Structures are given as C-alpha cells and as structure tokens.
Image (spheres, coloured by chain):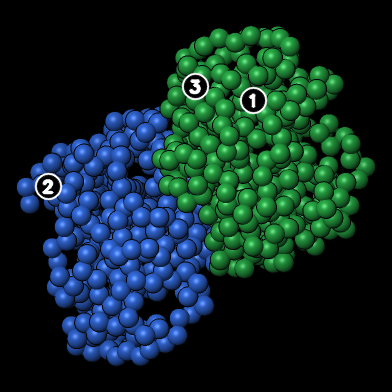
Chain colours: A blue, B green
Amino acid sequence: MGMEKGFSGKNILITGGLGCIGSNLAIRLVEAGAKVTLLDAMIPGLGGNAFNIDPIKDDVCVNFSDIRDENSIKHVVRDKEYIFHLAGQNDHTLSLTNPFPDIDINIKGSLVLLEACKNFNRQAKVIYTGTRGEYGSAVKLPVREDAPLYPKGIYELSSLTAQKLFKIYHDNHGIRTITLRLTNIYGERAQMQHHRFGVANWFIRLAIDRETIKVFGDGSILRDFLYVQDTVDAIMMAALREEAYGEVFNVGVDKPICFLDLVKTIIDLAGGGNWEFAPFTPERAVQEPGDFYSDISKARAVIGWEPKTGIREGIAGTIDYYRKNKTYYW
Amino acid sequence: MGMEKGFSGKNILITGGLGCIGSNLAIRLVEAGAKVTLLDAMIPGLGGNAFNIDPIKDDVCVNFSDIRDENSIKHVVRDKEYIFHLAGQNDHTLSLTNPFPDIDINIKGSLVLLEACKNFNRQAKVIYTGTRGEYGSAVKLPVREDAPLYPKGIYELSSLTAQKLFKIYHDNHGIRTITLRLTNIYGERAQMQHHRFGVANWFIRLAIDRETIKVFGDGSILRDFLYVQDTVDAIMMAALREEAYGEVFNVGVDKPICFLDLVKTIIDLAGGGNWEFAPFTPERAVQEPGDFYSDISKARAVIGWEPKTGIREGIAGTIDYYRKNKTYYW
C-alpha cells in the first residue's frame, strides 16, 4: 500500500510492542522503513511474547519497562514522531477480584505517557487504542461514536477514562491524540495461554487441539470480529490523517456474526473440534453487554479505512499461523 | 425536619469529614442522634479544618487517615449503615501542573472504599458526591442527568470515573450506591485560604477584607450556586430514599445567577469591597465550561428535595459565620 510510505524513516514508539497488535504493527512499520522502538513490561498473562517480533528482532529497539515508570517513559518518548499506545491490562474480568491494575496500568499509565509527551515531546502524534466496551450495552445498533457510554466493568471504564485523558491533553495541552475504539480483535500473535481476553483466538486454540468449545447461552449474541491486519491498517491510516486528531473512531466490522456461527466457522476451517452450549459463568453474565457491532462510517469517511478481510479468510490465516508456531504460544 | 429521625442511632462514616460539606453534614447527623465517625487525611489545602467540627468534637470519632490507605479503610467501613464519601482532591486546576492526585485520591481512593465495602460491609449504603464538571460545557440548559459527559479537565474526569465506579459496584456487586453531582457549593466551613476551589467563598473573603474581586471576562457567565445547608439536605434525603440507589442526581439550583450579580450581591451584603473586570487566566480559560445550571427535576421527583435558601440569605449567613470565626479560616 502506498499509505505505508508515510512512515519511512520516522522514529516511532509502540507501547505494548511485544503484544498482539503491537507486534503486528511493528512488523508493518519496519517493512515501511520506520525506525521502531518497542516498549513492553512483559507482565505475565498480558500478551507480551518475544517470539511475536522474531521476524524483525534485529531491526527494532526493545525497551523492557513499564508504562507506569515515569523515569523510563520520559526518556523513551523523546524524538518520536508517532507514539502508538497499546500497552494495557486487558483482562475483562480481573477487576472482579482485583480492580487496581485497571486503574494503575490503564489510567495512570496513560497519564504517565501523556505527561511525558507534554513535558518532553509536544510534537508527538499519539494514537491510543481503547475498547468498544466503553459503550456498554448498545442502545442502538450499529453503535456510533456518539452513543451513550456506560461501561459495564472496570476494565472498560479504565479504557473510557484513558480515552478522555487523551482528549483532554489534546484540547488543553495541544498534544495531538486519536482514540480508536477497537472491537473484538483476533489473529496471529495474540496470546493463546488463557481465555481471559481474546475469545475468538481461544476458540481457535480449542479447535486446533480438537477440544470442545463452550458456547455461552444460546450462541445468538452478535459481535463484530476484526482481523488484526485490518486493525493495523486502521491504526496506521488514522495516524497519517491530520483530520483524525482530537477524534474518536470505532474500528470494527459492520457485518456482525453470532457466536455460534463463529464457532462453527472455526471448527470447519480447523477441520476438527466440537462445541456445546454452556450457561454463562456468573462473572461473565454480569458484564455481558449483549449484541454489539460497530458503526464504522466515521472511520470510512475521515480515515478512509474499512476492513478488507472476510471472517473465513482471517480465521484461516490465524489457524495457519498457530499451526506453524504452536510451540511459541501454547 | 422529620426526615432527620431516620438517622437516629445509626452508625455512619463520613470521609472528608473535616471538610466543608462533611463537617456540616456531621453536625446535622449528630443533632439527629446518629453515631458518627469522620475520616480525614488532613491533606494541606484540601479543606480539612479541626475547627469545622468544634460544635460536635466530643460527640464524634475522628479517624485521621487517607482514603487510599487500604488497611485503614477496611476497618473503618465495618458496621456502618451509611457511608458518605466526600473525601477528594477538589482543586480544578492542579492537574495542569500535577494530574496524579486526581487519579490517586479521587479514582483509586473511591475504589479502595468500594472494595472495602465489597469485602467487609456489603450492607452499607454509600453516597458519593461528584461534580457538575462531569458534564463539561452544557449542550442544553438546564443540564439533565442524561446529558453528554465531556469533562474539560482531569479533576472533573476523575469525578466522572468515580461516579461510574460507584454505579458498577452497585450493578455488579450489589453495593447500594448513589451519586449526587453537586454544582458550585458555598457556605460556612469551606476553606478560605486560597482560590483554587470554592469561588463564591473566595469572593466572600475578599469582600469581608475590603479587597478587590476580579470578575473574569464580562461577568455574564451563568452558574447555579447552592448553599451548603441545602446540599446537606439533599445528601441526607437521598440516603433515606430507597428509590435513589443506583441513580445519579443533579444537586443544584435551577435559578442561575451571573458572576457579576453574584459579586455585587456579596459586596452589598458584606457592606464593602469592590470589583473589577479581569481577563481569564490561561489555565481557567482552557477549562471554563461557560454557562451552566442544573436541571433538578429528577431530585425533586425521586428524593423530594429542592433548595430552600435564597442566594441573599445564604450569603448573609456565610458572611456572618466567617466574621465570627475569621481566626480559624484566614
């Protein structure tokens, strides 16, 4: 794509750079000729994986540190033209037992980054990826960016608070920021060791292992699942679009699929596995927003982005990746 | 008032209990026959003042500790039937130089309290006082509770995040919580040493001292100023109303006054002082939401509350209090 030339020779920081989206983004940016620094705290369970950057390990600088480490962050932000803030605590149900990491990592961590930009790099263009969970239950489908914001859990609330921090620093301090509200993402380089986030990838693991996939409820809940390479497209295209700064964009798919059909598609493409209905666990039931899919007309109009990968194609690519590289993820 | 009998003999905790609203609330609850514990961290500049509770100092238990102190909070919440959470960092412009106290005290502090209730006192009824700043600029006047929420600064955002924490604990953990979004409060027992919060009280100090009050801009911005005793009424009445739990209520005045008229009224009632126009300071300009006054029809309907004190009466009472007790506040 011609778009990627915009990053040639640019100094770029990706926080959470060894995670799923961060590493896929890093690979694309290195291909585009960017000078890429990755920051990752490697907190167990949050998705950081050294193998994720194997194809570019000699082409990037990896800074192992934590987004909450003010002294570290005030140095790594300097001289960066683009900063992609993907580091975060993503476990949707952790807050039911320990809510403090959501506040510390997602809110305070975002604030440490923004303060570092304010004090040491006001020219940086900063792209933050939040979650569609900021909306909570959909009042109207598909969900637009101006829909009411009633997050159902503390992880989702921490993302909303971070989004508003990025907006406040844009308006009050002139730091150019964009927030993308990502829907359910799946694809290569996501963690596969637990089911606490990344439900589509977890189903893919079970199908590869010929295990039984539990479909909660009657499987009819609609959701939009977005392939990670399409997500990376959205992130890169937004960053290059001046009109996108100060704004929030949904990054999702306006053609939803129900959970049961997703599972059947995965089992079909994996050539095995099976499924059964199961009741929602109590902790999932209390935070389950029901049917959700994104209105992406704003991203289409302003960024010029839309998803290109069909669900079958994306799942097939994902299965292929993990079959080849299972040893690094299981 | 008959309403106050509802608190007779009840165990009650007030966080921020030595501050303006906390101490006025404590005095009323002691009069009503409640057993009151006050928690205050006495952080300099945030409003805690030992003299505030002089009339009840032998009738209350004061626990000097910080809302962020998990070990302290998990003990003070036990056996309390009502918990009024008023502790907070209230400086609207501090975040422009140091944004971390907003996150630590207002968000994490609220979370420490909610976790303590979840783990040690699920029966507690918890009333949180947030700010009308959660709305940001009014899209439509008067502002209803379902208006868009676009806080213009981090203090205001921290209040919004706390409000949503209280709602999430209500919905997910069965902790009964109410949020009141308070407008500009004035009255006796507010701090008078700086102008970083409590603009009406600051004007009153200047008039008492025969100094010049600076009216920003052309003085035409509308705001609803609520007397602290009316605020205490709202807090107490909400706590006693079962239907109020899980809800958010504006607590303000639907008859606004412009800043210039407020200042002229204060000077008139103080019998001295003077005023002049001044440009907004940059840090105030960037976070100034413009005209704002509250739609209080929900509080009227559900809680049965409305303000009873006219602006002249409230200001006269406030001036009288500080003339008598100046030595403890200046």
1 and 3 marks on the same chain: yes
- Tag 3 residue: B220
Task: Determine crowd level at label 2: few under 14, some 14-19, many 20+ residues with C-alpha closer than 10 A.
Answer: some
Q: Is residue A183 visible in this depiction of the protein?
A: no
Mark 1 against mark 3, which lies toward the viewer? 3
How far apart, in angstroms, are the residues tagged by discs 2 and 1? 55 Å
Q: Is residue A21 above or below residue B144?
A: below
- Tag 1 residue: B200
Q: Nearer the viewer, residue B313 or A263?
A: B313
- Number of numbered discs overlaid on the protein picture: 3
Looking at the image, do the residues carrying marks 2 and 1 touch, with CB atoms under 8 Å apart?
A: no
Task: Determine crowd level at label 1: few under 14, some 14-19, many 20+ residues with C-alpha closer than 10 A.
Answer: many
**Residue at screen point 73% across, 15% down:** B270
User: Element at badge 1?
Assistant: helix
**Residue at screen point 17% across, 52% down:** A300
User: Element at badge 2?
Assistant: helix
Numbered badge on residue B109: none
Within the image, what quadrant is residue B11 found in?
bottom right
Left or right: B86, with A325 as reference point: right
How far apart, in angstroms, are the residues tagged by discs 1 and 3? 15 Å
Numbered badge on residue A4: 2
Mark 1 or 3, nearer chain start: 1
